[in-house]
Image (cartoon, helix red, strand yellow):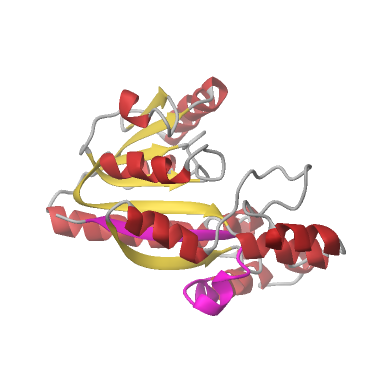
Amino acid sequence: MSDTSRPRASLRTAVVWEVLKEALDRRVKATGRDVLDVLDTGGGTGKFAVPVARLGHRVTVVDPSPNALFGLERRVGEAGVADLVRGVQGDAQGLLDVVDRDAYDVVLCHGVLEYVDDAAEGVANAVAALRPGGTLSLLAAGLGGAVLARALAGHFTEARTALTDPAGRWGAGDPVPRRFTAEQLSELVSGAGLAVGAVHGVRIFADLVPGVLVDTEPGAVEALLRLEEAAAELPAFHAVATQLHVLGEKRT
């Protein structure tokens, strides 16, 4: 795919999407079913739900925002997958009030744990919705990426605050309520009874490279994406990633 057809914004999701697509393929082979039941909790307007549906899977999106669900309805209509995606208003805390237990082959919990009151409860609810052998895809804000970003911006006191704050926040103006290390996310997954699978760093370089370099250098977007993919699985880079992605598998 050329730079002109790959928007720079896709760098934020490309690594996660490739890992998720492989996980979906594995579940298809394991279940022997071409169509999986996928739950996207906190799925918003369908950033992941739409491409998952385009693969032919049924997706239930749970989100607390009526506006987001309205945007989802419009997006799935434009994408031609309205018959495969349904939106339900709800949140992670009350997830099991709006979806069934043991009903999904794959559960996405992306950008949710930062905002819930109890991260362990949020993970436990997502796991409860999984069928035995199902896969949890967990994406959350990384502590190290925030510390590095504040330091590179010259906000050294804020960087140190984030480093020492129990929630990983750099100050009262920080829009993210909570950040995690790879170890913390892995512990949440294992604590919910799942086997921890792959751990990936996401947006390791993409948020740090000046946009002008990416937008004006021929081939830069593709090269940066290849760099992100190469570094994503290396533990040394998890500590500086803006986001962290963890896969977990529910034991049969």
Tell me residue 171's x, y (percent).
Answer: 77, 48
Q: Is residue 79 above or below residue 196?
A: above
Which residue occupies 80% across, 66% down? 151
Rendering quarter of residue 77: top left
204 with respect to 81 (left or right): right
Is 13 or 112 nearer to us in this picture?
A: 112
Q: Is residue 29 above or below residue 238?
A: above
Tell me residue 202's x, y (percent).
Answer: 55, 63
Magenta segment: 229-250
Residue 56 visible, this angle? no
Tell me residue 105's x, y (percent).
Answer: 24, 46
171 with respect to 94 (left or right): right
Rendering quarter of residue 208: bottom right
235 with respect to 84 (left or right): right
Is 69 or 233 nearer to us in this picture?
A: 233
Which residue occupies 17% across, 59% down? 29
Is 90 magenta? The answer is no
Is 245 magenta? The answer is yes
Image quarter in which the C terminus is found: bottom left
Outermost residue to the right? 154
Q: Is residue 169 above or below residue 147?
A: above
Residue 237 visible, this angle? yes
Rendering quarter of residue 67: top right
Tell me residue 93's x, y (percent).
Answer: 42, 32
How many numbered marks are there? 0
Which residue occupies 41% across, 31% down? 62
Q: Is residue 178 above or below residue 100?
A: below
